[in-house]
Amino acid sequence: MNGIKAKALRYYVGESMEVFGKRIGVAASTICAIENGQRDLSDYVRAKLIRLETQMPDEFFIFYERFCEST
């Protein structure tokens, strides 16, 4: 899990940084810093994101591949 995948997850579920941060349990500024590579993921955030990733449908992984190509 890295900042790019975290951003892709957020985009896929269609949430703002504020709403996504609440879902994960951190501030929107933390989400922003993670997505921009300014902050490493803590074990807590990494675990929450991995848990969310495991709940994604197969279509997310196609979305993620395309997301990575466009960034």
Image (spheres, rainbow, N blue to C red):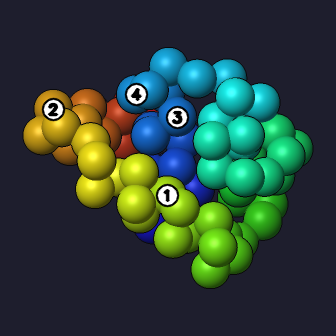
In the picture, measured across the screen, residue 38 lies left or right of residue 49, that is right
Judging by the rendered image, the residue that carries numbered circle 3 is 10
Label 3 SS: helix
Mark seen at residue 12: 4
Label 4 SS: helix
Q: CA distance from mark 3 to mark 1?
A: 10 Å
Nearest to the observer: residue 26 or residue 62: 26
In the picture, measured across the screen, residue 9 lies left or right of residue 20, that is left
Residue found 27% across the figure and 42% down from its top = 56
Q: Residues within 10 Å of mark 2 (few under 14, many from 20)?
A: few
Residue type highlighted by circle 4: Tyr
Judging by the rendered image, the residue that carries numbered circle 2 is 59
Label 2 SS: helix
Asked if 53 appears above or below 62 in the picture, the reply is below
Where residue 64 sits: x, y (%)? 30, 40
Where residue 50 sits: x, y (%)? 41, 63
Residue type highlighted by circle 3: Arg
Residue type highlighted by circle 2: Glu
Where residue 65 sits: x, y (%)? 24, 42
